[in-house]
Amino acid sequence: MIDSHCHLTDPRLRSQLADVLARAASHGVTRMITIGTDLDDAREAIALCKVLPNVRCAVGVHPNHTQNVELSDLPLLREIQADPAVLALGEMGLDYFHHFAPREKQFAVFEFQLQLATELGRPVVIHSREATDDTLAVMKKFPAVRAVFHCFTGTREEARKILDAGYLMGFTGPVTFKKSDELREVVRLMPQDRLLVETDAPYLTPEPMRKQKTNEPAFVRYVAEEVGRIKGWTLEQTDAITTANAERFFGLKK
């Protein structure tokens, strides 16, 4: 099983990494995509991949970190993307829930990364929070870019817009929460070939482990179990489907 989106460089996971990886293996989670959220984090993610053969990364500038980057520094992403450990650009996008960065700066950094993804033929990992329409409007200008909207927690209407645009969607712990009926309905309607499972660890711990505040890749199993329950698949079927989708999207070797 693949955790298609986690943050192994976060101190909450990095400080206990050997144990985190051992627990993942014991839960059948053998591969992970760790995400770099700014230029410094990108370098840390790549360094981690050098010593962990079952980990690869996507690196970019998260919208909530755009206030800390100069536009003149963004061309460094081209150099960073050349590393063989890197499979995608991101996470990138727009965040209207938090107010860490001005929207103008978010738009500028987002568009630069989409243009770079177009030039390099790279898939992208999208962070969109309370900004679906604007995110899709920006992406429409870059039609060649393949994308996954990670950690989808939106409405059926928002999901339909994302699917109509041709993108994938990743599901995390909230799909297991008691009050997430609409999100489970979205999963029910998802095409088989557009669905990924992820943790976004150390955030969003799923049930039945929700009391543990630090999420970790091992727990993607519980997300997969819930997705399988909704879709009428066994865990083995869910694993095979979502693993194949992740391999295809990220260009992962089997």
Image (tube, helix red, strand yellow):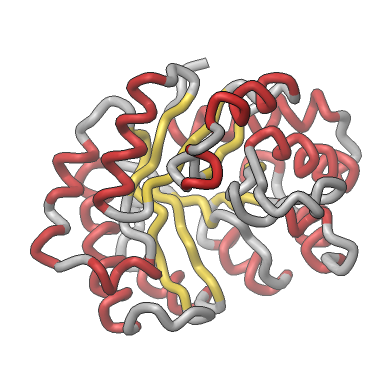
The residue positioned 48% from the left and 62% from the top of the image is 127
Residue 5 in the image: above or below residue 53: below
The residue positioned 36% from the left and 41% from the top of the image is 88
The residue positioned 30% from the left and 75% from the top of the image is 107
Residue 195 in sight: no
Residue 88 in the image: above or below residue 251: below
Judging depth in this view, the residue of 31 and 196 nearest the camera is 31
Asked if residue 188 lies left or right of residue 58, the reply is right
Residue at the left extreme, as displayed: 72
Asked if residue 172 lies left or right of residue 131, the reply is right
Position of residue 163 measured from the top left corner of the image (x, y, whole percent): 60, 59
Position of residue 126 measured from the top left corner of the image (x, y, whole percent): 46, 58
Residue 186 in the image: above or below residue 221: below
Position of residue 178 measured from the top left corner of the image (x, y, whole percent): 90, 63
Give the quadrant of the N terminus.
top right
- Residue 121: quadrant of the picture: top left
Position of residue 105 measured from the top left corner of the image (x, y, whole percent): 26, 77
